[in-house]
Amino acid sequence: MTLAPERTSTATRTGVNSRLSVTSTEPRPQRPELKKSGRPNPAAHLTPEQIEEIGRELDAIRAEVMDSRGAKDAAYIRKVIKTQRYLEMGSRAALLFSGVKYRGVRPFWWIGTAGLSVSKILENMEIGHNVMHGQWDWMRDPKIHSTAWEWDNASPSSQWKHSHNEIHHTFTNVLGRDNDLGYGILRVDEDQKWTLFYLFQPIWHVANALMFEYSIAAYDLELGGYLAKKKRLSAEEKAKFRKEADEVLAKIKRQATKDYVVHPAMAAATFTGSTRHTLTANIVANLVRNVWTNTVIICGHFPPGIETFEKTSIEGETRGDWYLRQMLGSGNISGSKAMHVMTGNLSHQIEHHLFPDMPSNRYAEIAPKIRDLMERNDLKYVTGSLAKQVGGVYWKVVELSLPNKVEGRRRRDTILKAARKAIKGKGGQGRRY
């Protein structure tokens, strides 16, 4: 593998955001007070010069942190990886005796399942997600490098890095460009068109949370787009999709074999009747990891107060504009240090979207500076407790499963009209309401 260049700390190199997408160096005209949808523009009060000054302040914050990376940061990620691995090994050892009962309880099952759940969350969130963002490439450690890390997840790292790092982080919350905006199955903003499909999105949302790693694998593969465009694709495009699909299936097979075959089989060797219980423990641990990961992600992207952007709004986007979009299109979760680690520090989602390749342990350090910068410029810094953010998202999922409210028209009538057209086959599914 090819390692990243050695870190020679300079303002020029560390001041460059690896995901920042700039299409213009000239400040754009003053923003209108309303978006095309008629909703208020939260940045309308800022002049083009103020927006560019925000960009310069953020560049300075980034440079200060990136220039100070060192032994303390390296020790942090190595400690987290070591903790995760010991926790996984200890939990799997406990599960070898998960069939043993004591006073009607299987203590090794509970201990092993809880430990394995936490282990999987740590590996996916604080380690895998952040390593694959390149946050630790500066260490030049071939074992902790974005080009080499393969995580404990159904989606191959190469496909995840493309859909997440290259697309989502470049086009954050841009309608029609950022597929993370509802993952193609949820309507999370009023400016997204409503169809009958979204009427059932509370059900899709729960199912998606439970099967999140497989949903992400299908999403990274762009399965929905392939099925929709299959008849129009060239032979080369179909061959490329089949190759990537084979990679996903191979990864899923490896993961399933490890969790649902190898480890239960190892438990059988203890002759304690632990095979079935080890299997259920792995199933539960994966479900817990899926639901937790989904919860953290939706709280960072979909709670009330988060803004979305039209395709045309990013034309001629400057450095300051890009930074502004990241701040307005993300939300944080308040909580303890332990909770921040368990979220992969994505509880600092605003800071992460501003600087996705900054070491995650430094987000808490810069969060007060980012909040101060936003408040000085009269920009809403969206944050709240886990319960508040989860409640807000679930409310939106239910509320936006229905058509937008229109004066003089009941939403029930809109739904019935769309249903009648769909039944008659007149294209009601694709119409906006």
Image (tube, grey):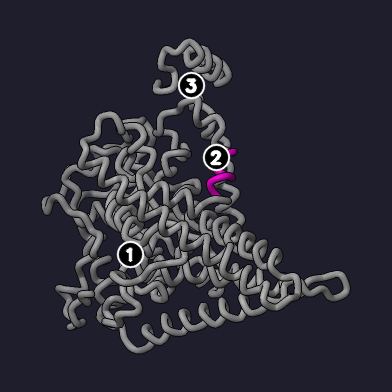
Q: Check whether the beta carbons of the residues at disc 2 and disc 1 lie within 8 A of each other.
A: no
**Image side of residue 26 versus residue 181, left or right:** left
Q: Residue furthest top?
A: 424
Query: As shown in the figure, which amino acid type bears the numbered disc 2?
Result: Trp
Residue behind mark 3: 406
- Spatial distance from mark 2 to mark 3, Cα to Cα? 25 Å
Decide which of 93, 222 is in the foreground and name it: 93
Label 1 secondary element: loop
Query: As shown in the figure, which amino acid type bears the numbered disc 3?
Result: Val
Q: Please provide percent x and percent y for residue 293.
A: 52, 59
Query: Does residue 395 sit above or below 373 in this rendering?
Result: above
Q: Residues within 10 Å of mark 3 (few under 14, many from 20)?
A: few
Label drawn at residue 356: 1
Label 3 secondary element: loop
Asked whether residue 424 appears in the rendered view, the answer is yes
Q: Residue furthest right?
A: 103
Decide which of 8, 329 is in the foreground and name it: 8
Residue drawn at point x = 56 percent, y = 47 percent: 392
Query: As shown in the figure, which amino acid type bears the numbered disc 1?
Result: Pro
Asked whether residue 381 appears in the rendered view, the answer is no
Label drawn at residue 204: 2
- Spatial distance from mark 2 to mark 1, Cα to Cα? 29 Å
